[in-house]
Amino acid sequence: MARQILVADIGGTNARFGIAKRVEGGRWAIEHFAKFQGDDYPTFQGVLKAYLDPFGGSKPEHAIFSVAGPVSDNKVRLTNRDWALDGQVLSETFGFERTMIVNDFAAMTRCVPELDDDDFLHVKDGQAQSDAPILVAGPGTGFGVGYLVPLLQGGWQVLTTEGGHQAYAPQTDRELELLKNLREKFGFVSLEKVSSGSGMDDVHEAICKRHGVPYKLLSPAVIMEKAKRGDAVSLELCEIRAAATMGAVGDMALSGGARGGVVLAGGVSERMIEFFKTEDSMSRFLKRGKRSDYMEDIPIRLLVNPRAALYGAAALYEDFAKLS
């Protein structure tokens, strides 16, 4: 029987679970998929129990959890939620033979070669180099960054980073004013603060201050709708976040040699892709002075499969199992 692996994608907002196994043709299948709202559970053990209870005594013996936070010694505390995971404790509590904890963007990065063309939306033409790294990056609740490096002997090496916490790099007068307003309140201003869901309200408030209008808390959907209707504050908010994202992704492609292509990921990327594709935003990726030619052939795709990190987690578990 094919090995069945409990896989999970644990973000700042949602926890997604499934059972992964290889099927005919070597593809992964994800069964028993379920999504839970993190706010409904004070601990990760609570949400994991809620998922596993219906299985009774037939739950998988292998587990891997991809988590939005820096992993050390098979332990992690989420960056944007007060949950802590310890692989050994989870094995002892739930009876897993082996429990692995990996960074969520490690799983998101590793999923890319496991998916089909239909799992991506074309954003920019280019010619990917098969022997070059692939950059996987983008904003969700936070801002994830990973590189997928092809190995000479076959397979892939995933490099996880904390690139979302690099400094925000404004390029225009209004962006410099935004930085000034945010810096007065927060000191250091990261890319994640400007581009991600967790920082959107602070950026919105700062832009309202710049326009001299009262700040009112609005949902992302309302802001997007107002931007499309031409509301000055909402439009500026979307344009600045898109420009920050595409400029940073261009920096990462340059510094990481990502001529294998760029994959945009994250819920904010999906919602804001039309703003990412505008001429102004794309110019932030493309315009690199003397090395603008370097960027021309790098293709960009948007990852649109909501279960992508689950496939990547399964592939990572298999990768590590082969080494152990």
Image (spheres, rainbow, N blue to C red):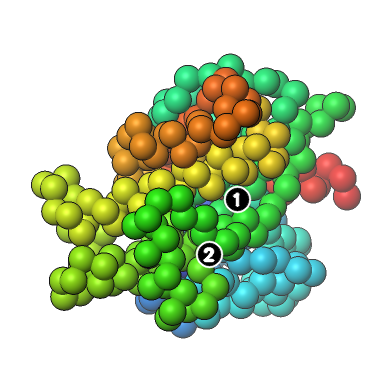
Residue furthest out toward the left:
229
**Picture quarter with the N terminus:** top right
Name the residue rendered at 31%, 70% in the picture.
206
Q: Amino acid at mark 2?
A: Ser
Q: Is residue 132 visible?
A: yes
x and y percentages locating residue 297 in the rendered image: 57, 20
- The residue to which callout 1 is attached is 145
Disc number for residue 190: 2
Q: Are marks 1 and 2 in contact (CB under 8 Å)?
A: no
x and y percentages locating residue 168 in the rendered image: 52, 59
Element under label 2?
A: loop
Q: Is residue 241 visible?
A: no
Disc number lying in front (1 or 2): 2
x and y percentages locating residue 266 in the rendered image: 45, 49
Of 55 and 211, the residue lying toward us: 211
Residue furthest out toward the front:
173
Is the residue marked by circle 1 packed among few (<14), some (14-19), or many (20+) residues within 10 Å? Answer: many
Name the residue rendered at 60%, 50% in the picture.
145
Left or right position of 98 against 247: right
Of 153 and 197, the residue lying toward us: 197
C-alpha span from label 1 to label 2:
14 Å
In this picture, is 55 found above or below 139? below
Of 58 and 162, the residue lying toward us: 162
In this picture, is 97 found above or below 244? below
In this picture, is 215 found above or below 247? below
